[in-house]
Image (cartoon, coloured by chain):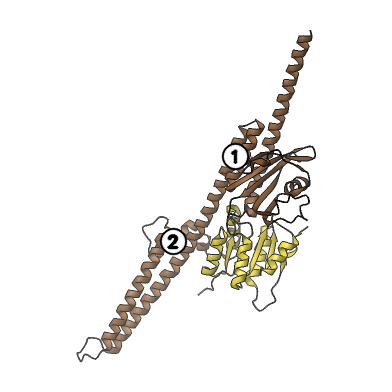
Amino acid sequence: MSPRKPRVLIVEDDPDLLVVLRVNLTAMGVEPILAGDGRTAISRIQAESPDAVVLDVMLPGIDGWSVLEDLHALGDPVPIVVCSAKKDVEDMDRARELGASGYVVKPFDIDRLVDAVMEAVGRNTDAEPGWQLGVQGTELA
Amino acid sequence: MFERDKAPDGDRLRREARVAGLRDFRMPSLEAVERRRLRLWLVTTIVLIVVAAGVMVVVRPTGSSSVLSEPMLRLAIFVLALAFCVYAIEKEFRLGRATRLLTDERVLTAALTNRLHEASLLLDAGRAMNAVLDLPELLETVLRSACDLLDANGGSIMLVEGDDLVTLCVRGRQEAVGARLRLGDGVAGHVALRREPVLIDGHVDPKEFPGLADRDPYVESAMSLPLIHRDEVVGVLNVNAAAGRGFTEYDLRAVAVFAEQAATAVANARLYEAERAHVAQLIELREAVGEAG
């Protein structure tokens, strides 16, 4: 029996990005699952226990920050890669404090985001949690 | 990678649904899959109860002889129950996958619908703005469209006049019409000077916005956007959220696209107004010359 494919939840309200991320992650052998808003994201994380989450902060209704806060409060250890158009250090610190494992500044290079997600998926749980700033050296300035 | 992994989602979904027993559907609905799952659990429970009852009957000493020996019967029932459990698990697995795929489809459809709705509102607003050249009427249209777009309960438009911002159109607090604010003062002045939108949620720090009016420190939720046309700030659009609804960065992004269109419409209306005044002046001058001649 083949091992289960890693499952990644993509939380994004932009339909184009949803499709692009789904196609790219599927090509990497990941089973992507989708959420278009914060409420759906929380319910799918709880119901399907994904191996990693790609979380856009700008969402309709419950935004990405609230999702992070909720998961942090619940103590959910799922690795989360936060995507945001804001590149302020305060925002990155906030994401890190709320338990995010990575922070990607939009607009991003899709390959780098996929790399960040794959790293989050494959992270050894015993290892020191890594912090990817702007995805492996992406310029933040 | 297996060929089946490359199949489009629709095909994968139909295949999962067919294997799971939903043969009558070209594209099964989430509800149909959930109903099928419920039926599966119901049938599984009933079969297991029947099997348990069968085992109890078999192990009961009846004294009568049977074609099959008691151990053989027990084994047969056990194998039957095991086979059914495997069948139920396989179906549940398939139905679970179908549920996930259908939920994904719903998410994509919802995202596309939201995008279409947003685009449609922006298109309507753009059409309405382009149909008006009279400045007061245009400002009214812009503010109404912004409030509709954001489901807001009020706001204002301030236009740049020299070094000041003048409130020309208001929804809500009508006494604010005509109020002047220096560029750089308060939230709107800060937005006009910095050319950056501001999202306010709760308390406004007077240190961050010097010249803030005393009544302003607490705003439940509001946003202020610069109206920029050809690199020139023509004004500021302020929108206040309805009670109990907080604006997010998502709303700010949606209305930023709208603000670009509004700025162009305002600049055109101002140009039209200036041209009209110029023509009126020329007519007046011509009449004066005619009278003098």
User: Left of A49 or right of it: where is B232?
Assistant: right
Residue A90 found in image quarter: bottom right
User: How far from the left and from the top, in percent, is residue B86?
Assistant: 40, 75
Question: Which of the two discs, 2 and 1, sits closer to the camera?
Answer: 1
Residue B228 seen anywhere in this rendered image of the structure: no
Look at the image and give the colour of chain B.
Answer: brown
Secondary structure type for disc 1:
helix
Chain bearing tag 1 is: B
A98 or B102, nearer to the observer: A98
Image quadrant containing the C terminus of chain B:
top right
Mark 1 Cα-neighbour bin, 10 Å: few <14, some 14–19, many ≥20: many
Mark 2 Cα-neighbour bin, 10 Å: few <14, some 14–19, many ≥20: some
The vertical placement of A59 against A70, above or below, is: above
Disc 2 + disc 1, Cβ < 8 Å: no
User: Left of A59 or right of it: where is B158?
Assistant: right
Q: How many marks?
A: 2
* Residue type, label 1: Ala
Q: Determine the residue positioned at 70% across, 38% down.
A: B178
Q: Determine the residue positioned at 59% across, 36% down.
A: B128
B256 or B61, nearer to the observer: B256
> Which label was assigned to residue B267?
none
User: How far from the left and from the top, in percent, is residue B66?
Assistant: 21, 87
> Which label was assigned to residue B125?
1
Look at the image and give the colour of chain A.
Answer: yellow
Q: CA distance from mark 2 to mark 1?
A: 44 Å
The vertical placement of A43 against B226, above or below, is: below
Residue identifier under label 2:
B15
**Earlier along the polypeptide chain: callout 2 or callout 1?**
2
* Residue type, label 2: Arg
